[in-house]
């Protein structure tokens, strides 16, 4: 679908004009203009009670006397001045549904007049495009019967504001990155294994001159001493690959890189500490962190941001077989710390600890890891907020700010020395689990042993990376948050 921004006179011919109407008889500029041109037709609808302006109401009118536009689509915007971001997105979805049902190909959108509290036109347009692209997403490549694509080809935002072009460019690029992340995460685990992740990274790197790829295979991991990572991989016949995507685009090529590390468990059966059967299929999404890092790297390339960023996809599979690692095993990690394995299902932190040690060599400006790490995080925060853990106040504030801006929400959870108590082992430097309580924080506390050499934050996306139920599937989160964080780093 195409998006444009240009100021269009409502008296001009158009296939469809989209205008907003508020509850409590407050009218938008375009509403008043059309009402005047149609000699009070819209007001008549309000008087008769057919048009209320209730949030999400839609009314499609054809061939109104006095209007050159063939149709107008009226969208209820609720009470003026009270529109939240979430309600705005609902209203955009209602608009999309009405456009879809009526097979409209081209529309001029005057919802640019709709005010979001504390938001300017940039966000009005950005949220609209991101919502439309998100709603139009289908993952039907394994279906014989494909869904009918929407007929809408072009949406013109009615504005000449200079911010609009940037909003369109950002939204389109982010929507592409989100789609890419959703596609890889939704891919079934018999297709999407660690080699597949590396292959996707290769394809992406080949498309952009600023991107290059390094792939670390199991032989190289063994040479590097990445024994915790390798232990997790041993139970699977699909070998592990760690893909390292370098985006080197800062004006000064020697600028220290920002590093994004994604947990890439293409399937997590739990290993010998096998998970229960119910919902185990969802563990194909255990590479959601890697998928979001991949999507973010794609946006970076698309927007050509002047930054040095390294994205690492820590691909691996956790299965039980005769060669699998066991509870009781003691592993020597790449940084020398030993870990007693008490549960092979706490594998994410084992893969990540060696990856986090590996990235020291790039002398990072800062490192953010993104991982579907703990069920405990979902218990704590549900499915709306990702868990953010870090002791770097500045980094926390930058990440929470990006989360708030994008509505790709995050909430801070504690780290701290208290949680270290729970990770003590009589036989090794660390245990890989910390008992029943505070599981998201003990996982974070475990990782903190491997991040001492740089500024670091951890995002637990176990609750936000995918949805269950009728709308089940990958969400593409937190591509939007990460991208915004990076866009803000440029300024
Ligand atoms: N990938 C899972 C975390 C997970 C579980 C995400 C359910 C989303 C939904 C992770 O590898 C895991 O299994 N974590 C264990 C850790 C426990 C053994 C300490 C968990 O959360 O149960
Ligand atoms: Mn697990
Ligand atoms: Zn896992």
Image: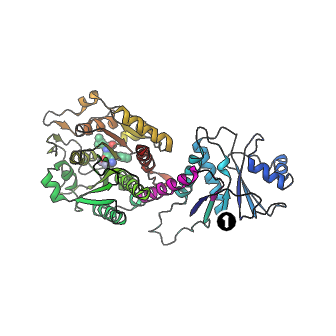
Near-viewer residue (480 or 32): 32
Give percent across and percent down for residue 180.
42, 59
Quarter assignment of residue 101: bottom right
Q: In the image as oriented, which residue stretches furthest toward the right?
A: 39
470 lies left or right of 355: right
Residue designated by label 1: 104
Residue at 47% of width from left, 44% of height from top? 408
59 lies left or right of 444: right
Q: In the image as oriented, which residue stretches furthest toward the bottom?
A: 144
Residue at 26% of width from left, 35% of height from top? 434
Q: Is residue 330 above or below residue 391?
A: below
How many numbered marks are there? 1
Quarter assignment of residue 426: top left
Q: Is residue 243 magenta?
A: no
Residue at 30% of width from left, 47% of height from top? 255
Give the SS element for disc 1: loop
Q: Is residue 433 visible?
A: no
Quadrant of the image containing the C terminus: top left
Give percent across and percent down for residue 220.
16, 57
Q: Is residue 172 magenta?
A: yes
Near-viewer residue (347 or 37): 37
Q: Main secondary structure of the magenta part?
A: helix
Q: In the image, which residues are magenta?
A: 156-182
344 lies left or right of 258: left
Q: Is residue 303 above or below residue 341?
A: below
């Amino acid at each position: 679908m195409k998006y444009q921004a240009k100021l269009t006179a409502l008296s001009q011919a158009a296939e469809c004009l989209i205008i907003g109407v508020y509850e409590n008889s407050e009218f938008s500029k375009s509403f008043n203009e059309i009402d005047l041109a149609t000699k009070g037709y819209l007001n008549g609808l309000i008087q008769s009670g057919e048009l209320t302006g209730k949030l999400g109401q839609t009314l499609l009118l054809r061939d109104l006397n006095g209007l050159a536009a063939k149709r107008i689509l009226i969208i209820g915007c609720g009470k003026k001045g009270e529109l939240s971001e979430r309600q705005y997105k609902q209203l955009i979805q209602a608009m999309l549904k009405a456009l879809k049902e009526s097979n409209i190909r081209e529309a001029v959108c005057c919802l640019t007049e709709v005010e979001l509290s504390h938001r300017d036109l940039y966000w009005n347009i950005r949220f609209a495009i991101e919502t439309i692209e998100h709603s139009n997403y289908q993952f039907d490549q394994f279906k014989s019967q494909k869904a009918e694509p929407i007929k809408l080809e072009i949406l013109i935002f009615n504005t000449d504001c200079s911010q609009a072009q940037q909003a369109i460019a950002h939204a389109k690029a982010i929507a592409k990155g989100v789609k890419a992340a959703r596609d890889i995460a939704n891919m079934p685990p018999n297709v999407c294994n660690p080699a597949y992740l590396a292959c996707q990274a290769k394809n992406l790197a080949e498309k952009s001159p600023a991107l290059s790829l390094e792939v670390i295979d199991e032989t190289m991991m063994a040479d590097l001493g990445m024994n915790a990572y390798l232990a997790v991989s041993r139970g699977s016949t699909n070998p592990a690959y760690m893909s390292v995507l370098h985006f080197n685009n800062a004006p000064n090529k020697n600028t220290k890189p920002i590093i994004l590390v994604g947990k890439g468990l293409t399937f997590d059966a739990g290993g010998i500490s096998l998970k229960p059967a119910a919902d185990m299929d969802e563990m194909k999404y255990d590479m959601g962190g890697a998928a979001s890092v991949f999507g973010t790297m794609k946006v970076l390339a698309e927007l050509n941001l002047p930054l040095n960023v390294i994205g690492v996809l820590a691909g691996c599979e956790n299965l039980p077989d005769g060669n699998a690692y066991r509870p009781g095993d003691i592993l020597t990690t790449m940084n020398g710390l030993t870990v007693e394995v008490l549960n092979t299902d706490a594998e994410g932190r084992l893969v990540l600890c060696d990856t986090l040690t590996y990235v020291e060599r790039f002398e990072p400006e800062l490192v953010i890891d993104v991982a579907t790490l703990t069920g405990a995080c979902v218990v704590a925060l549900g499915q709306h907020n990702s868990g953010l853990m870090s002791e770097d106040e500045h980094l926390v504030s930058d990440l929470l700010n990006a989360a708030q801006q994008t509505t790709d929400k995050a909430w801070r959870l504690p780290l701290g020395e208290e949680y270290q108590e729970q990770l003590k082992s009589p036989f090794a430097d660390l245990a890989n689990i910390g008992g029943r309580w505070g599981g998201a924080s003990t996982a974070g506390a475990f990782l903190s042993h491997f991040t001492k050499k740089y500024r670091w934050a951890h995002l637990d996306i176990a609750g936000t990376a995918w949805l269950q139920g009728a709308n089940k599937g990958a969400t593409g989160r937190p591509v939007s948050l990460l991208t915004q964080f990076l866009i803000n780093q440029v300024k």
